[in-house]
Amino acid sequence: MIHRAKSSHAGSALSMVELLVVLYNRILRIDPSRPDWPGRDRFLLSKGHACAGLYAVLSARGFFPAAWLNDFYKDSTPIAGHVTHGSIPGVEVSTGALGHGLAIGCGMALAGKRDGSTYRVFVLLSDGECDEGSTWEAALFAPHHRLNNLIAIVDYNKIQSLGTVKDVLDLEPFRKKWEAFGWATQEIDGHDLGQIERALEDTARESSRPTCIIAHTVKGKGIDFMENKLLWHYRSPDDQELRLALSQLESVE
Amino acid sequence: MRAAFFRALVRVAEERPDVHLIVGDIGFGAVEPYIIKFPDRFLNVGVAEQNLTGIAAGMALSGKTVFTYSIGNFPTLRCLEQIRNDVCYHRANVKIVAVGGGFAYGALGMTHHATEDLAILRALPEMTVIAPADPIEAECATEAVAAHSGPCYLRLGRAGEAVVHRSPIDFEIGKAIQVREGTDVTFISTGGLLGTALEVADALAEMGSEARVLSMHTVKPLDADAVLAAARDTRAIVTLEEHSVIGGLGSAVAEVLAEASDTHVSFKRLGVATGFSRIVGSQNWLRHHNGLSVEAVLQSVVPLLATSEAR
């Protein structure tokens, strides 16, 4: 899909694949035939540039036909290069400008509480967008209002647009920051399906705090020439690279 | 206007359980009646306008009608991208309310002068932009935006403005209110300058000219029919706004006139033409300083009328 579209952000999509697979298959209370069902869990991909991964998972989960993925980046289609709400079933909100998702998630979680609804809100953030002040405005808000129905997951792949997180704007001590803000915080290997599922299941036991799951991940995970390479925030695979990438992914299965 | 807004909001919230109010740590001495009645539908997010707007969008996308409230530029410019992406794109039912439009907080300095907000908010797709003229319009506008589906910006003055409308008004979003009839010149004002327009009209009447006065409370969508009628019926149009002459009411009216093929009306935008006020003063003083007092407006209009007469 990224190859066909000659688009960017392959590495950003690959680092969160396992997180999305576990969420959509084991955790989220959703019904693909009723994407607007009021009782559904909400999933917000705040790192909207990684939309290729979300679209693929939504399609695999039956929200829309796989053929739609062929329209990615195409003229006159709604399958935009950042997560776009409106014409794509299962997409809750449009994102792409970083630092918006967690506040919207706070609003949805608060509305759910005020309504006595039992749905939960999951927001997947990038590490880069933890540079945004707005992310921390929301991080301050959620524990104060005891939004235990809100779960933030940070895809901590350690590479942002122009370099490593450590070099650009270090987030460490990252866990301590979330804990100090009042979040129940866990650190996991974001590619270990078992760890992801256990961590997400644990969130249901929080009675008064929101949860932050810091998922340590690898940008471009699963394709050796993409892994941990800043280049794959931007580059689109050519024909040969695509063949190689697919063969590596198939050999995993 | 502030008291009128809260009066109307309490009334609306009584009828509509979906109405919520979120403030950015602003509203001392004004918001209390609402809080007492609807503690469960009130929220103070603290001094965090981006969060304020994002949360409002999230709540609106969960079925609420959410009013956000703060001072001057804080609920608009500080969180402009949240308004554009989170509110407007999703057509979220968020009503942004700013108290202190224009120079209402004139002495507080440049940070508290809201003089580009109409232009900037007007440019956003899906956004309705309203600047009521007096407490009566503010009450009507509050009810109207609550009933309207989609994003709205309600730009209030401050506390304690005089009532300008002497008779009951028919308030409809996007429909100008004609307050005075005349055939020589039309004043189109938005926000709190309606009283000034009427005073200028009285002064002109003594000089033998009759002015039509329109309260253009809705800057977007603009009542183009009222503008075109004024262009047909009167010889000159003057817009009045406590706002930059760039992008606000004057620009909106100019756009309509420029695209109309059959009008030859004289036209003048009055507003803030000098950019930032680097000196402060009361609202009235700053109006005068920016050519928006009754005397200053008269001085601008008399030559315009003379020119249009000469044609």
Image (spheres, rainbow, N blue to C red):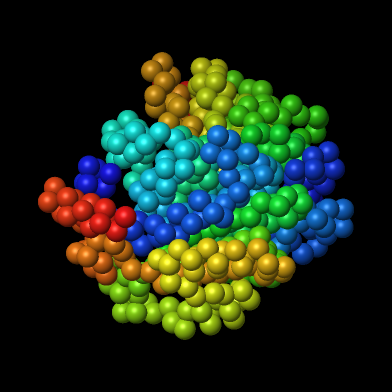
Q: Is residue B294 above or below residue A162?
A: above
Between B166 and B79, the residue placed more toward the observer is B79
Image quadrant holding the N terminus of chain A, namely top left
| Quarter location, residue B230 | top right
Between B165 and B221, the residue placed more toward the observer is B221
Q: Is residue B309 left or right of residue B173?
A: left
Q: Is residue B18 above or below residue A151?
A: above
Residue B161: percent from the left, percent from the top?
75, 49
Image quadrant holding the C terminus of chain A, namely bottom left
> Outermost residue toward the left?
A240
Q: Residue at x 45, y 63 (%)?
A: A193
How many marks on residues? Answer: 0
Residue A36: percent from the left, percent from the top?
59, 38
Residue B145: percent from the left, percent from the top?
68, 38
Q: Residue at x 59, y 20 (%)?
A: B183
Between B243 and A235, the residue placed more toward the observer is A235
Between A52 and B4, the residue placed more toward the observer is A52
Q: Residue at x 48, y 57 (%)?
A: A22
Q: Residue at x 41, y 16 (%)?
A: B262
Residue B168: percent from the left, percent from the top?
80, 29
Q: Is residue B308 left or right of residue A106?
A: left
Q: Is residue B142 visible?
A: yes
Q: Is residue B110 visible?
A: no
Q: Is residue B249 left or right of residue A158?
A: right
| Quarter location, residue A49 | bottom left
